[in-house]
Image: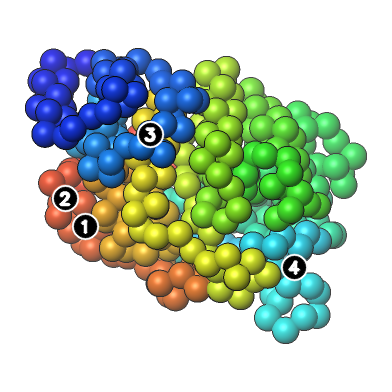
Amino acid sequence: MSKHLISSTRQLIQQINLSKGITPIVNKVVEGDRILLADAELLYNEAELGLLGILATHVAERINGKSVLFNRNFHIEPTNICLHSCSFCSYRRSEGEDGAWLLSLNEIAEQVRHSMGKQATEVHITGGVHPQWDVDYYCEMVRAIKRVNPSIHVKAFSAVELDYAIAKSGLTLQQGIRELKRCGLNSIPGGGAEIANSELRQAICGSKTSWSRWLEIHETAHNEGLTSNATMLYGHMESYAHRIEHMSDIRELQDKTGGFNCFIPLKFKAQNNSMSHIGEVSTVEDMKNFAVARIFLDNVPHLKAYWPMLGKSAASLALGFGVDDLDGTIDDSTKIYSMAGAEDQSPSMSIDEICSTIRSVAKNPIERDSLYNHLKVY
Protein backbone atom coordinates (compact mmCIF):
# COMPACT_ATOMS: atom_id res chain seq x y z
CA MET A 1 0.00 0.00 0.00
CA SER A 2 1.22 3.51 -0.80
CA LYS A 3 2.84 5.24 2.18
CA HIS A 4 1.60 8.53 0.75
CA LEU A 5 -2.01 7.27 0.80
CA ILE A 6 -1.68 6.15 4.41
CA SER A 7 -0.08 9.43 5.42
CA SER A 8 -2.65 11.63 3.68
CA THR A 9 -5.54 9.62 5.18
CA ARG A 10 -4.08 9.92 8.66
CA GLN A 11 -3.75 13.69 8.22
CA LEU A 12 -7.45 13.94 7.37
CA ILE A 13 -8.42 11.75 10.32
CA GLN A 14 -6.44 13.93 12.75
CA GLN A 15 -9.08 16.60 12.25
CA ILE A 16 -11.76 14.32 13.72
CA ASN A 17 -12.19 13.56 17.42
CA LEU A 18 -12.23 9.74 17.58
CA SER A 19 -13.76 7.73 20.39
CA LYS A 20 -11.73 4.96 22.04
CA GLY A 21 -13.91 2.32 20.43
CA ILE A 22 -13.54 3.71 16.92
CA THR A 23 -9.77 4.30 17.00
CA PRO A 24 -8.66 0.64 16.69
CA ILE A 25 -11.06 0.13 13.76
CA VAL A 26 -9.71 3.23 12.01
CA ASN A 27 -6.17 1.89 12.39
CA LYS A 28 -7.20 -1.45 10.88
CA VAL A 29 -8.76 0.23 7.87
CA VAL A 30 -5.84 2.59 7.26
CA GLU A 31 -3.32 -0.27 7.47
CA GLY A 32 -5.38 -2.48 5.14
CA ASP A 33 -6.44 -5.05 7.74
CA ARG A 34 -9.84 -6.76 7.65
CA ILE A 35 -12.48 -5.47 10.03
CA LEU A 36 -14.77 -7.74 12.06
CA LEU A 37 -18.56 -7.87 11.99
CA ALA A 38 -18.65 -6.07 15.37
CA ASP A 39 -16.35 -3.38 13.93
CA ALA A 40 -18.74 -2.79 11.05
CA GLU A 41 -21.70 -2.44 13.42
CA LEU A 42 -19.77 0.09 15.48
CA LEU A 43 -19.00 2.09 12.34
CA TYR A 44 -22.68 2.11 11.39
CA ASN A 45 -23.77 3.21 14.86
CA GLU A 46 -21.04 5.57 16.04
CA ALA A 47 -18.75 6.81 13.26
CA GLU A 48 -19.25 10.33 11.96
CA LEU A 49 -20.26 10.53 8.33
CA GLY A 50 -17.14 12.52 7.47
CA LEU A 51 -14.92 9.83 8.97
CA LEU A 52 -16.74 7.12 7.03
CA GLY A 53 -16.17 9.08 3.82
CA ILE A 54 -12.44 9.38 4.53
CA LEU A 55 -12.07 5.67 5.35
CA ALA A 56 -14.16 4.46 2.40
CA THR A 57 -12.24 6.72 0.03
CA HIS A 58 -8.99 5.35 1.45
CA VAL A 59 -10.10 1.77 0.72
CA ALA A 60 -11.39 2.67 -2.75
CA GLU A 61 -8.14 4.41 -3.67
CA ARG A 62 -6.07 1.54 -2.27
CA ILE A 63 -7.91 -0.85 -4.59
CA ASN A 64 -8.64 1.31 -7.65
CA GLY A 65 -6.74 4.56 -7.31
CA LYS A 66 -8.78 7.58 -8.34
CA SER A 67 -10.51 5.73 -11.18
CA VAL A 68 -14.29 5.71 -11.52
CA LEU A 69 -15.59 3.25 -14.09
CA PHE A 70 -18.63 3.09 -16.36
CA ASN A 71 -19.75 1.18 -19.44
CA ARG A 72 -22.00 1.54 -22.46
CA ASN A 73 -24.94 -0.66 -21.63
CA PHE A 74 -28.66 -1.12 -21.91
CA HIS A 75 -31.25 -3.31 -20.23
CA ILE A 76 -33.78 -5.74 -21.61
CA GLU A 77 -36.63 -6.60 -19.27
CA PRO A 78 -38.37 -9.42 -21.15
CA THR A 79 -41.41 -9.57 -18.89
CA ASN A 80 -42.80 -8.30 -15.62
CA ILE A 81 -45.10 -11.32 -15.31
CA CYS A 82 -43.83 -13.11 -12.23
CA LEU A 83 -44.93 -16.04 -10.11
CA HIS A 84 -43.53 -14.35 -6.98
CA SER A 85 -45.30 -11.53 -5.13
CA CYS A 86 -42.58 -9.69 -3.20
CA SER A 87 -43.87 -6.98 -0.88
CA PHE A 88 -41.28 -4.40 -1.97
CA CYS A 89 -41.81 -4.87 -5.71
CA SER A 90 -43.55 -2.20 -7.80
CA TYR A 91 -42.71 -3.94 -11.06
CA ARG A 92 -44.46 -7.31 -10.91
CA ARG A 93 -47.76 -8.07 -12.68
CA SER A 94 -49.89 -11.16 -13.24
CA GLU A 95 -50.60 -12.37 -16.75
CA GLY A 96 -53.45 -10.32 -18.23
CA GLU A 97 -53.19 -7.63 -15.56
CA ASP A 98 -53.07 -4.01 -16.62
CA GLY A 99 -49.44 -2.98 -17.09
CA ALA A 100 -48.13 -6.49 -17.76
CA TRP A 101 -45.80 -7.06 -20.71
CA LEU A 102 -44.15 -9.98 -22.46
CA LEU A 103 -41.57 -9.32 -25.16
CA SER A 104 -41.18 -11.71 -28.08
CA LEU A 105 -37.75 -12.89 -29.19
CA ASN A 106 -38.13 -10.66 -32.26
CA GLU A 107 -38.80 -7.64 -30.04
CA ILE A 108 -35.76 -8.50 -27.93
CA ALA A 109 -33.61 -8.80 -31.06
CA GLU A 110 -34.88 -5.41 -32.22
CA GLN A 111 -33.74 -3.80 -28.96
CA VAL A 112 -30.28 -5.23 -29.58
CA ARG A 113 -30.25 -3.83 -33.14
CA HIS A 114 -31.22 -0.42 -31.78
CA SER A 115 -28.27 -0.50 -29.35
CA MET A 116 -25.65 -1.16 -32.00
CA GLY A 117 -25.65 2.42 -33.25
CA LYS A 118 -24.78 3.52 -29.72
CA GLN A 119 -21.81 1.16 -29.40
CA ALA A 120 -23.23 -0.67 -26.38
CA THR A 121 -20.91 -3.38 -25.10
CA GLU A 122 -23.28 -4.99 -22.58
CA VAL A 123 -26.90 -6.03 -22.35
CA HIS A 124 -28.27 -6.58 -18.85
CA ILE A 125 -31.29 -8.92 -18.83
CA THR A 126 -33.52 -9.47 -15.84
CA GLY A 127 -37.24 -9.49 -15.24
CA GLY A 128 -40.07 -11.46 -13.73
CA VAL A 129 -39.89 -15.20 -13.09
CA HIS A 130 -42.25 -16.26 -15.87
CA PRO A 131 -43.95 -19.57 -15.00
CA GLN A 132 -43.47 -21.00 -18.54
CA TRP A 133 -39.79 -20.19 -19.08
CA ASP A 134 -37.08 -22.80 -18.70
CA VAL A 135 -33.41 -23.11 -19.63
CA ASP A 136 -34.23 -23.89 -23.26
CA TYR A 137 -36.15 -20.62 -23.60
CA TYR A 138 -33.41 -18.60 -21.93
CA CYS A 139 -30.93 -20.20 -24.34
CA GLU A 140 -33.15 -19.18 -27.28
CA MET A 141 -33.14 -15.64 -25.96
CA VAL A 142 -29.35 -15.51 -25.63
CA ARG A 143 -28.86 -17.00 -29.09
CA ALA A 144 -31.29 -14.46 -30.59
CA ILE A 145 -29.22 -11.66 -29.09
CA LYS A 146 -25.91 -13.10 -30.24
CA ARG A 147 -27.21 -13.53 -33.79
CA VAL A 148 -27.75 -9.77 -33.95
CA ASN A 149 -24.56 -8.79 -32.11
CA PRO A 150 -22.11 -11.67 -31.55
CA SER A 151 -19.67 -9.48 -29.62
CA ILE A 152 -22.05 -8.09 -27.01
CA HIS A 153 -21.58 -9.24 -23.43
CA VAL A 154 -24.77 -10.89 -22.14
CA LYS A 155 -25.13 -10.36 -18.39
CA ALA A 156 -28.40 -12.09 -17.76
CA PHE A 157 -30.84 -13.84 -15.45
CA SER A 158 -30.80 -13.31 -11.71
CA ALA A 159 -30.27 -16.26 -9.40
CA VAL A 160 -34.03 -16.28 -8.77
CA GLU A 161 -34.79 -16.61 -12.50
CA LEU A 162 -32.10 -19.27 -12.88
CA ASP A 163 -33.33 -21.23 -9.88
CA TYR A 164 -36.82 -21.63 -11.33
CA ALA A 165 -35.79 -22.18 -14.95
CA ILE A 166 -33.16 -24.79 -14.13
CA ALA A 167 -35.53 -26.70 -11.82
CA LYS A 168 -38.29 -26.54 -14.45
CA SER A 169 -35.87 -28.09 -16.95
CA GLY A 170 -35.03 -30.95 -14.60
CA LEU A 171 -31.34 -30.05 -14.53
CA THR A 172 -28.81 -29.66 -11.77
CA LEU A 173 -27.45 -26.18 -11.17
CA GLN A 174 -24.17 -27.15 -12.79
CA GLN A 175 -25.91 -28.59 -15.86
CA GLY A 176 -28.18 -25.58 -16.26
CA ILE A 177 -25.42 -23.01 -15.94
CA ARG A 178 -23.13 -24.97 -18.27
CA GLU A 179 -25.87 -25.08 -20.91
CA LEU A 180 -26.52 -21.35 -20.65
CA LYS A 181 -22.80 -20.61 -20.86
CA ARG A 182 -22.57 -22.82 -23.95
CA CYS A 183 -25.38 -20.81 -25.55
CA GLY A 184 -23.57 -17.51 -24.97
CA LEU A 185 -24.29 -16.34 -21.41
CA ASN A 186 -21.26 -14.31 -20.28
CA SER A 187 -21.99 -13.32 -16.67
CA ILE A 188 -24.77 -13.11 -14.09
CA PRO A 189 -26.29 -10.00 -12.45
CA GLY A 190 -26.65 -9.72 -8.70
CA GLY A 191 -30.43 -9.39 -8.39
CA GLY A 192 -32.67 -11.39 -6.09
CA ALA A 193 -30.27 -11.23 -3.15
CA GLU A 194 -32.54 -8.85 -1.18
CA ILE A 195 -31.51 -9.50 2.45
CA ALA A 196 -29.91 -12.58 3.97
CA ASN A 197 -31.83 -12.91 7.22
CA SER A 198 -34.41 -15.69 6.88
CA GLU A 199 -37.13 -14.02 8.98
CA LEU A 200 -36.91 -10.76 7.07
CA ARG A 201 -36.76 -12.64 3.80
CA GLN A 202 -39.92 -14.52 4.72
CA ALA A 203 -41.65 -11.22 5.52
CA ILE A 204 -40.76 -9.38 2.30
CA CYS A 205 -40.25 -12.11 -0.32
CA GLY A 206 -41.30 -15.39 1.26
CA SER A 207 -41.79 -17.41 -1.93
CA LYS A 208 -38.50 -16.36 -3.49
CA THR A 209 -35.30 -18.38 -3.74
CA SER A 210 -33.69 -18.75 -0.30
CA TRP A 211 -30.50 -16.92 0.58
CA SER A 212 -28.52 -20.15 0.84
CA ARG A 213 -29.73 -21.13 -2.63
CA TRP A 214 -28.82 -17.67 -3.99
CA LEU A 215 -25.29 -18.16 -2.68
CA GLU A 216 -25.15 -21.70 -4.09
CA ILE A 217 -26.17 -20.49 -7.56
CA HIS A 218 -23.49 -17.81 -7.60
CA GLU A 219 -20.87 -20.21 -6.29
CA THR A 220 -21.77 -22.69 -9.02
CA ALA A 221 -21.57 -19.97 -11.66
CA HIS A 222 -18.14 -18.91 -10.37
CA ASN A 223 -16.93 -22.49 -10.44
CA GLU A 224 -18.11 -22.74 -14.06
CA GLY A 225 -16.09 -19.69 -15.04
CA LEU A 226 -18.84 -17.05 -14.95
CA THR A 227 -18.35 -13.96 -12.83
CA SER A 228 -21.29 -12.22 -11.19
CA ASN A 229 -22.33 -9.26 -9.07
CA ALA A 230 -23.94 -9.14 -5.63
CA THR A 231 -26.68 -6.83 -4.38
CA MET A 232 -28.36 -6.02 -1.08
CA LEU A 233 -31.78 -4.42 -0.64
CA TYR A 234 -31.57 -1.95 2.25
CA GLY A 235 -33.71 0.75 3.84
CA HIS A 236 -36.80 -1.33 4.65
CA MET A 237 -37.21 -3.45 7.81
CA GLU A 238 -33.61 -4.48 8.32
CA SER A 239 -31.18 -3.50 11.08
CA TYR A 240 -27.47 -2.77 10.72
CA ALA A 241 -26.78 -6.28 12.01
CA HIS A 242 -28.88 -7.70 9.17
CA ARG A 243 -26.89 -5.72 6.59
CA ILE A 244 -23.61 -6.93 8.07
CA GLU A 245 -24.84 -10.54 8.12
CA HIS A 246 -25.64 -10.22 4.42
CA MET A 247 -22.30 -8.67 3.50
CA SER A 248 -20.41 -11.17 5.65
CA ASP A 249 -21.83 -14.07 3.63
CA ILE A 250 -20.81 -12.33 0.41
CA ARG A 251 -17.30 -11.68 1.76
CA GLU A 252 -17.00 -15.32 2.80
CA LEU A 253 -18.04 -16.61 -0.63
CA GLN A 254 -15.70 -14.14 -2.31
CA ASP A 255 -12.83 -15.49 -0.21
CA LYS A 256 -13.71 -18.93 -1.58
CA THR A 257 -14.30 -18.19 -5.28
CA GLY A 258 -13.18 -14.66 -6.14
CA GLY A 259 -16.07 -14.53 -8.59
CA PHE A 260 -17.86 -11.32 -7.57
CA ASN A 261 -16.92 -8.29 -9.66
CA CYS A 262 -18.99 -5.75 -7.82
CA PHE A 263 -21.27 -5.07 -4.85
CA ILE A 264 -24.38 -2.97 -5.43
CA PRO A 265 -26.45 -1.67 -2.49
CA LEU A 266 -30.02 -1.19 -3.75
CA LYS A 267 -32.23 1.25 -1.88
CA PHE A 268 -35.83 0.32 -1.15
CA LYS A 269 -38.08 2.70 -3.09
CA ALA A 270 -41.49 3.19 -1.56
CA GLN A 271 -43.96 4.02 -4.33
CA ASN A 272 -46.56 1.61 -5.72
CA ASN A 273 -45.92 -1.39 -3.50
CA SER A 274 -47.35 -2.89 -0.33
CA MET A 275 -44.45 -1.62 1.81
CA SER A 276 -44.97 2.03 0.87
CA HIS A 277 -45.93 2.90 4.46
CA ILE A 278 -42.32 2.29 5.55
CA GLY A 279 -41.02 5.27 3.59
CA GLU A 280 -37.44 5.67 2.44
CA VAL A 281 -34.18 6.24 4.29
CA SER A 282 -32.29 9.53 3.92
CA THR A 283 -29.41 10.34 1.62
CA VAL A 284 -27.19 10.46 4.71
CA GLU A 285 -28.12 6.84 5.39
CA ASP A 286 -27.37 5.96 1.77
CA MET A 287 -23.87 7.39 2.06
CA LYS A 288 -23.24 5.68 5.39
CA ASN A 289 -24.25 2.38 3.84
CA PHE A 290 -21.98 2.81 0.81
CA ALA A 291 -19.06 3.68 3.06
CA VAL A 292 -19.43 0.74 5.45
CA ALA A 293 -19.91 -1.62 2.51
CA ARG A 294 -16.67 -0.40 0.90
CA ILE A 295 -14.77 -0.75 4.18
CA PHE A 296 -16.18 -4.18 5.07
CA LEU A 297 -16.07 -5.86 1.64
CA ASP A 298 -12.30 -5.65 1.33
CA ASN A 299 -12.16 -8.52 -1.20
CA VAL A 300 -14.83 -7.31 -3.65
CA PRO A 301 -12.99 -5.06 -6.10
CA HIS A 302 -15.76 -2.63 -7.05
CA LEU A 303 -18.64 -0.79 -5.38
CA LYS A 304 -21.42 0.50 -7.63
CA ALA A 305 -23.84 3.37 -7.23
CA TYR A 306 -26.70 2.29 -9.47
CA TRP A 307 -27.81 5.76 -10.46
CA PRO A 308 -31.28 4.90 -11.91
CA MET A 309 -32.18 3.78 -8.39
CA LEU A 310 -30.28 6.39 -6.40
CA GLY A 311 -30.65 9.43 -8.65
CA LYS A 312 -27.83 11.21 -10.45
CA SER A 313 -27.02 13.75 -7.74
CA ALA A 314 -26.88 11.15 -4.96
CA ALA A 315 -24.80 8.84 -7.16
CA SER A 316 -22.34 11.69 -7.65
CA LEU A 317 -22.21 12.23 -3.89
CA ALA A 318 -21.54 8.51 -3.37
CA LEU A 319 -18.23 8.89 -5.22
CA GLY A 320 -16.97 10.44 -1.98
CA PHE A 321 -18.06 7.39 0.04
CA GLY A 322 -16.13 4.59 -1.61
CA VAL A 323 -18.00 4.15 -4.89
CA ASP A 324 -15.83 3.57 -7.97
CA ASP A 325 -18.46 2.39 -10.49
CA LEU A 326 -21.37 4.42 -11.89
CA ASP A 327 -22.88 1.55 -13.92
CA GLY A 328 -23.50 2.84 -17.45
CA THR A 329 -25.40 4.80 -20.03
CA ILE A 330 -28.62 2.70 -19.61
CA ASP A 331 -30.33 4.45 -22.58
CA ASP A 332 -33.80 4.62 -21.00
CA SER A 333 -34.10 0.84 -21.02
CA THR A 334 -35.18 -0.08 -17.48
CA LYS A 335 -38.49 0.38 -15.68
CA ILE A 336 -37.88 -1.47 -12.41
CA TYR A 337 -37.00 1.60 -10.35
CA SER A 338 -38.98 4.17 -12.31
CA MET A 339 -42.13 2.16 -11.47
CA ALA A 340 -41.15 2.43 -7.79
CA GLY A 341 -40.86 6.21 -7.89
CA ALA A 342 -37.21 6.79 -8.76
CA GLU A 343 -36.14 10.33 -9.60
CA ASP A 344 -35.18 9.47 -13.19
CA GLN A 345 -38.34 8.25 -14.90
CA SER A 346 -36.53 7.85 -18.25
CA PRO A 347 -33.05 6.89 -17.08
CA SER A 348 -30.25 7.70 -19.51
CA MET A 349 -26.82 9.31 -19.24
CA SER A 350 -24.52 10.36 -22.06
CA ILE A 351 -20.79 9.65 -21.95
CA ASP A 352 -20.15 13.38 -21.55
CA GLU A 353 -22.55 13.58 -18.61
CA ILE A 354 -20.97 10.58 -16.88
CA CYS A 355 -17.45 11.93 -17.38
CA SER A 356 -18.46 15.37 -16.13
CA THR A 357 -19.99 13.82 -13.01
CA ILE A 358 -16.81 11.91 -12.29
CA ARG A 359 -14.47 14.83 -12.93
CA SER A 360 -16.57 17.08 -10.68
CA VAL A 361 -15.29 15.13 -7.66
CA ALA A 362 -11.66 15.05 -8.89
CA LYS A 363 -11.82 11.44 -10.07
CA ASN A 364 -10.71 9.94 -13.38
CA PRO A 365 -13.43 8.61 -15.74
CA ILE A 366 -12.57 5.30 -17.40
CA GLU A 367 -14.80 3.31 -19.72
CA ARG A 368 -14.76 -0.40 -18.86
CA ASP A 369 -16.08 -3.62 -20.28
CA SER A 370 -18.37 -5.95 -18.33
CA LEU A 371 -15.43 -7.75 -16.71
CA TYR A 372 -13.89 -4.45 -15.57
CA ASN A 373 -11.11 -4.33 -18.10
CA HIS A 374 -10.29 -0.72 -18.92
CA LEU A 375 -11.23 0.28 -22.47
CA LYS A 376 -10.68 4.04 -22.62
CA VAL A 377 -9.40 6.78 -20.35
CA TYR A 378 -11.29 10.07 -20.79
Q: Secondary structure at mark 3?
A: helix
Identify the mark at residue 357; answer none if there is no mark.
1
N-term-proximal mark, 4 vs 2: 4
Q: In the rendered view, does 225 fall on the left or right side of 117?
A: right
Question: x, y percentage for residue 69?
Answer: 30, 44
N-term-proximal mark, 2 vs 3: 3
| Residue appearing at x 26%, y 54% in the figure | 317
Residue placed most toward the observer, 35 or 94: 35
Residue placed most toward the observer, 125 or 201: 201
Amino acid carrying label 1: it is Thr
Q: Secondary structure at mark 1?
A: helix
CA–CA distance between discs 3 and 1? 28 Å
Q: In the rendered view, does 8 fall on the left or right side of 97?
A: left
* Above or below, 95 relative to 170: below
Amino acid carrying label 4: it is Ile
CA–CA distance between discs 4 and 3? 40 Å
Amino acid carrying label 3: it is Leu
Q: Which residue is mark 3?
A: 43
Q: Which residue is mark 4?
A: 81
Q: Residues within 10 Å of mark 2 (few under 14, many from 20)?
A: few
N-term-proximal mark, 3 vs 1: 3
Amino acid carrying label 2: it is Val
Question: x, y percentage for residue 152?
Answer: 48, 49
- The label nearer to you, 3 versus 1, is 3
Q: Quadrant of residue 27?
A: top left
